[in-house]
Image: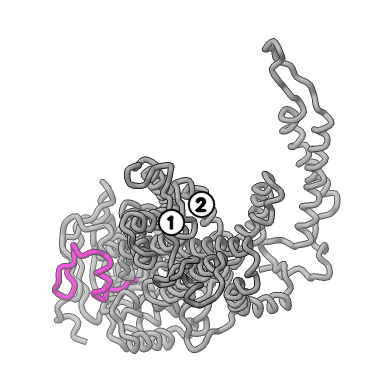
């Protein structure tokens, strides 16, 4: 490894100005060739159907100038950061500070999350947004088992979310079962679907696995749309019962919680209740995942991600290991789905498109595969960011895509690329990041 | 050691295996007695690694028989073979690069029903054998040097307290000094723990000096066998594997 760049002289090894200009000129030339037809010439069908065209050299010049300037800026930025792959962008002192912050950020976030309904009691919008973020945190944690730990790329995770949601919706509306009975049932049914998906894809890996799981997600959605008699088709299921606090409804009625506690009824009570419900569900997901990672089964998931052949040679039954990974991930997706159904009161296949799978996967990848805290940060950034840029309207996807590309350039292993070891000899040793980088030796 | 009179721990009879239509093993007979180090040498593509993999059921034997400790294991699923306490350090080491050294070692014991004390004893044994691993305990496997990775692969295999240890090219890509350390460790394991070892090697000189007996494999068949020192004296072995190139 080469020595890190001294922070005081960042440009010491940098290519000269001439080279930067040369590169920028080449980029500009490529842009000129590309855009001369795309932007420089505008064609349209005239009133009589003949082709009319006119030139827009002004715009073309602007674009080329932008590319030229942008390329110089990118190059300068790159020099300022130092080579991304080799050196530490952040000086060691700051890194140590971050490590300390990293140890505290989890507990601090947890305390903050518990206090959210207290602090923002009157801000309905913020409460709703936090519930949404927490739902995605839970989905992210669930998918993390499959993608982050077991390394099975699942593009159809929304299927399990849908199965959970419809399980609760149909059981509750048709049989009048309560939320607390349906919740485990939704999880079991989703896990069952996970095993169902798992069997045909046992031999697949990587791209092939991704395609089949993608198809599985679509199959579930199409079944939901077309099985009109059971699912109500595109009209969805309405009138899904709200959850109760172990049988006590959160309504203004005489037997409601407010009346029982002799406090004034407020619709916010239900929101607060939903908030703590999803917080509890998410924390259970997290706790179970952390526990599993320390058990042989969790270790086997990770080993499976690393090397399937070696796993078999060590006597790991790869079939059951994969199936349990699928089932565990799917079960959490099912729980989240049941929560989604009871929160919305109405579900339809529209809520379970590929877009959702992609979003959850993006959260897992951005967070750093396998990192629990990373998923939280990524979910806050993704869902919160989405809301933050609502004013930007149609440009927010653009901003978002750009942010993701930049993040993947600078932090290719996600926000939290560090993987916490699960086995310790005596105590948890702090290991310098020099030692945990891959690809040496 | 009365290795000659004992019944074999592993007995292979007329073993055939193929990848599709290409036959890699064409009727192999091989015996390993308890407490023995057996070396299997041969050129690239002779079928040495295939033989090791076939003992593990991948690829499955087309015909013939593999017997371990008197039990026919020819059709036993791969993951259950490991549970009979046959361990292997596969070709190319295949450690888990993103997992720590400690986790890699634990993986070796996970599939067998090891008690906590067995695990602790296993770790202790591995660390006395390879003190380097103890220094690297919390590091990622992928950050180790080649030699350390080989130590880790052997250590991982040892964690299941194997009765038979199979090593596929343990000296591959290692500096001679490190390779010697690895071979010394294998000898120690055999002498002190009485561990039975099958070692597949291209480094015939090292392997035959280490082994009690050796087999030479050519094109999927065993062509020669004998004690290590016998084989080392054979002119055709010297020509083909030890002074290769000088006679070409």
* Tag of residue A161: 1
- Which secondary structure lies at badge 2? helix
Observer-nearest of B142 and A131:
A131
Observer-nearest of A231 and B48:
A231
The answer to whether marks 1 and 2 mark residues whose Cβ atoms lie closer than 8 Å is: yes
Residue placed furthest toward the front: A254
- Which secondary structure lies at badge 1? helix
- C-alpha separation, residue under disc 1 versus residue under disc 2: 9 Å
* Residue A392 visible from this viewpoint: yes
* Tag of residue B155: none
* Residue B243 visible from this viewpoint: no
Residue A125 point in image, percent of width and height: 63, 60
User: Residue tagged by mark 2?
Assistant: A356
Relative to A149, is B1 on the left or the right? left
Q: Residue at x 65, y 57 (%)?
A: A385
The magenta region covers B67-88
Observer-nearest of B75 and B19:
B75
Residue B106 image-quadrant placement: bottom left
Observer-nearest of B181 and A415:
A415
């Amino acid at each position: 490894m080469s020595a890190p760049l001294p922070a005081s002289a960042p440009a010491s090894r940098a290519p000269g100005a001439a080279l930067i200009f040369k590169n920028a000129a080449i980029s500009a030339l490529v842009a000129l060739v590309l855009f001369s037809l795309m932007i420089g010439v505008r064609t349209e069908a005239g009133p009589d159907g003949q082709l009319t065209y006119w030139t827009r050299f002004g715009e073309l010049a602007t674009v080329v100038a932008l590319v030229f300037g942008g390329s110089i800026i990118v190059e300068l930025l790159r020099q300022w950061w130092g080579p991304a792959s080799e050196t530490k962008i952040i000086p060691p002192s700051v890194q140590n500070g971050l490590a300390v912050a990293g140890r505290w950020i989890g507990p601090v976030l947890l305390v903050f999350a518990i206090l959210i309904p207290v602090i923002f009691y009157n801000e309905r919008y913020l409460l709703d947004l936090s519930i949404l973020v927490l739902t995605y945190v839970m989905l992210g944690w669930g998918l993390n088992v499959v993608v982050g730990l077991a390394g099975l790329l699942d593009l159809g995770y929304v299927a399990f979310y849908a199965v959970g949601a419809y399980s609760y919706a149909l059981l509750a509306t048709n049989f009048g079962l309560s939320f607390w009975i349906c919740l485990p049932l939704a999880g079991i049914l989703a896990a069952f679907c996970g095993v169902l998906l798992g069997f045909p894809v046992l031999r697949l890996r990587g791209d092939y696995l991704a395609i089949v799981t993608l198809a599985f997600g679509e199959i579930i959605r199409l079944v939901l749309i077309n099985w009109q008699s059971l699912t109500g088709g595109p009209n969805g299921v309405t009138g899904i019962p709200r959850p109760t606090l172990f049988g006590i409804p959160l309504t203004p009625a005489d037997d409601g919680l407010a009346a029982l506690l002799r406090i004034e009824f407020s619709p916010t009570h239900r929101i607060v209740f939903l908030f703590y419900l999803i917080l509890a569900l998410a924390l259970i997901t997290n706790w179970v995942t952390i526990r599993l990672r320390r058990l042989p089964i969790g270790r086997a998931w990770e080993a499976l991600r690393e090397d399937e052949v070696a796993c078999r040679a060590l006597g790991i039954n790869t079939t059951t290991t994969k199936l349990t990974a699928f089932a565990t991930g799917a079960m959490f997706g099912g729980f989240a789905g049941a929560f989604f159904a009871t929160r919305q009161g109405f579900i339809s296949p529209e809520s379970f498109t590929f877009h959702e799978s992609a979003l959850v996967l993006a959260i897992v990848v951005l967070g750093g595969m396998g990192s629990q805290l990373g998923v939280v940060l990524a979910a806050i950034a993704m869902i919160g960011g989405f809301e933050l840029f609502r004013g930007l309207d149609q440009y927010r996807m653009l901003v978002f895509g750009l942010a993701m590309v930049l993040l993947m350039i600078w932090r290719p292993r996600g926000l939290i690329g560090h993987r916490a070891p699960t086995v310790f000899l005596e105590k948890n040793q702090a290991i310098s990041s020099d030692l945990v980088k891959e690809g040496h030796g | 050691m009365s290795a000659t009179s004992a019944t074999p721990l592993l007995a292979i009879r007329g073993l055939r295996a193929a990848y599709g239509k290409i036959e890699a093993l064409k009727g192999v007979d091989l015996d390993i007695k308890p407490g023995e180090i057996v070396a299997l040498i041969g050129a690239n593509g002779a079928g040495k690694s295939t033989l090791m993999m076939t003992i593990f059921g991948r690829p499955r034997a087309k015909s013939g028989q593999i017997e371990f400790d008197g039990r026919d294991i020819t059709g036993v699923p791969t993951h259950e073979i490991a549970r009979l306490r046959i361990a292997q350090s596969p070709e190319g080491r295949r450690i888990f690069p993103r997992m720590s050294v400690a986790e890699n070692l634990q993986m070796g014991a996970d599939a067998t029903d090891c008690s906590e004390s067995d695990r602790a004893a296993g770790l202790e044994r591995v660390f006395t054998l390879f003190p380097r691993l103890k220094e690297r305990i919390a590091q990622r496997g992928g950050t180790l040097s080649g030699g350390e990775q080989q130590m880790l692969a052997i250590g991982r295999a040892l964690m299941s307290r194997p009765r038979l240890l199979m090593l596929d090219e343990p000296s591959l890509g290692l500096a001679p000094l490190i390779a010697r350390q690895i071979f010394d460790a294998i000898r120690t394991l055999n002498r002190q723990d009485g561990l039975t070892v099958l070692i597949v090697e291209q480094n015939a000189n090292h392997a035959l000096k280490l082994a009690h007996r050796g087999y030479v494999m050519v094109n999927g068949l065993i062509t020669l066998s004998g004690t290590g020192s016998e084989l080392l004296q054979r002119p055709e072995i010297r020509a083909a594997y030890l002074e290769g190139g000088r006679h070409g």
